[in-house]
Image: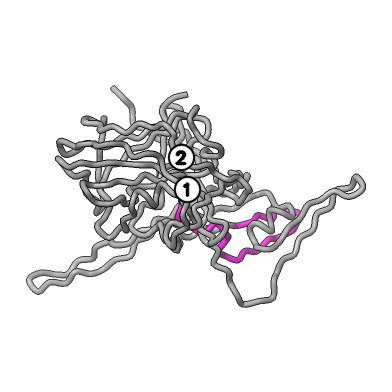
């Protein structure tokens, strides 16, 4: 019989840093969308409901990257529409596939957004998805978007027209930079807001509403760039006359903050009992350190650099969306 799956180890931290990596449109890119009538396992455990039964559904896919004009996220032009898909019973999902050989330039440097249309309506953002740059893109639409999610016409999604909510429509990919080595582990704190339901016929009871995640860790590396990453500042490295120079400016004397929009980061989780590791992708968090820290430069200990990444739903695409995406591929 199968054993329990226990995992022991430390999560790796990978931060998506800005880069000049324009993501080409998905216009005309081949993709498949199909209804999976019997997924091996489906477990729905939040306020979203399953896909509507006996309705005409369609999906399309857009690339997601950094909006260099407005900061935050933006989506590029979409694929063609999938054509009609029909869910015939509860517990069915829609599978979306783009083969790796068909990836447009830099698609693997960004994320993807899956859009769902019901009947004669317009498209709503159904979910964000992780893109593995080295493998086929495979994702599943499990639930119907909330009624409060904004609708967009396919003609707009398929175009490159700038929009107040969709951004400048010129997404740029990110370099994935491994932070570390960490020391003392990686802490993931799951936070809830609660309201109390108070009724006259019984005692009141609290119920969770909003949920978010804070990730904190310490890095043993403490060179100049590491300290700038953790403590804010500006850094340059350059070569002159065969000599390499580094400069940094820190401790800006101001009480101002610049809210520049979110960037993704991900945790590479410890190996499971079958030898595989999942990705936990966070897309609604500030990836600039949100705490002060003390470094002790002495002979008996290492001067670590501390990070805290907090949830910040400040991008127009993020409300009423899942901002943590978990992806596990059980294959070599």
Q: Secondary structure at mark 1?
A: loop
Tell me if I can see residue 313 in this picture. no
In the image, residue 216 lies at what x, y percent? 52, 55
- Left or right: residue 327 versus residue 197 is right
Q: Which residues are magenta?
A: 280-306
The reply to whether callout 1 and callout 2 are in contact (CB within 8 Å) is: yes
- Left or right: residue 113 versus residue 15 is left
Please identify the quarter of the rendering in which residue 36 is found. top left
Residue furthest toward the bottom? 255
Q: Residue 122: which numbered mark, if any?
A: none
Name the residue: 24% across, 54% down. Answer: 47
Residue furthest toward the right? 241
Prevailing secondary structure class for the magenta stretch in the rendered image: loop
User: Could you tell me how many numbered marks the image carries?
Assistant: 2
| Residue carrying label 2 | 26
Name the residue: 33% across, 65% down. Answer: 193
Q: Secondary structure at mark 2?
A: loop
Magenta residue check for 332: no
* Residue 331, above or below 294: above
In the image, residue 153 lies at what x, y percent? 33, 52
In the image, residue 164 lies at what x, y percent? 44, 63
| Residue carrying label 1 | 76
Identify the mark nearer the N-term, 1 or 2: 2
Name the residue: 52% across, 49% down. Answer: 171
């Amino acid at each position: 019989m199968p054993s329990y799956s226990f995992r022991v180890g430390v999560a790796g931290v990978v931060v998506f840093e800005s880069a000049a990596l324009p993501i080409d449109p998905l216009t005309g890119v081949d993709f498949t969308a199909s209804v999976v009538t019997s997924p091996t396992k489906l477990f729905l455990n939040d306020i979203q409901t399953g896909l509507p039964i006996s309705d005409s559904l369609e999906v399309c896919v857009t690339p997601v990257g950094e909006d260099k004009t407005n900061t935050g996220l933006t989506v590029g032009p979409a694929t063609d529409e999938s054509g009609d898909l029909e869910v015939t019973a509860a517990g069915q999902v829609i599978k979306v596939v783009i083969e790796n050989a068909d990836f447009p330039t830099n698609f693997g440097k960004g994320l993807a957004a899956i859009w769902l249309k019901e009947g004669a309506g317009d498209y709503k953002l159904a979910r964000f998805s992780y893109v593995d740059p080295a493998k086929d893109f495979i994702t599943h639409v499990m639930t119907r978007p909330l009624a409060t999610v904004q609708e967009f016409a396919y003609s707009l999604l398929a175009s490159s027209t700038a929009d107040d909510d969709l951004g400048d429509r010129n997404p740029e990919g990110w370099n994935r930079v491994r932070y570390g080595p960490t020391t003392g582990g990686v802490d993931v704190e799951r936070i809830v807001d609660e309201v109390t339901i108070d009724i006259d016929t019984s005692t009141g009871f609290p119920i969770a509403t909003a949920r978010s995640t804070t990730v904190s860790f310490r890095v043993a590396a403490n060179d100049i760039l590491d300290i700038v990453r953790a403590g804010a500042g500006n850094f340059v490295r350059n070569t002159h006359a065969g000599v390499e120079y580094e400069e940094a400016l820190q401790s800006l004397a101001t009480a101002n903050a610049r809210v520049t929009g979110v960037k993704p980061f991900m945790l590479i989780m410890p190996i499971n009992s079958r030898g595989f590791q999942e990705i936990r992708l966070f897309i609604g968090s500030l990836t600039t350190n949100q705490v002060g820290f003390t470094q002790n430069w002495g002979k008996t200990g290492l001067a670590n650099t501390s990070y805290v990444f907090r949830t910040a739903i400040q991008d127009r695409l993020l409300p009423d969306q899942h901002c943590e995406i978990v992806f596990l591929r059980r294959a070599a």
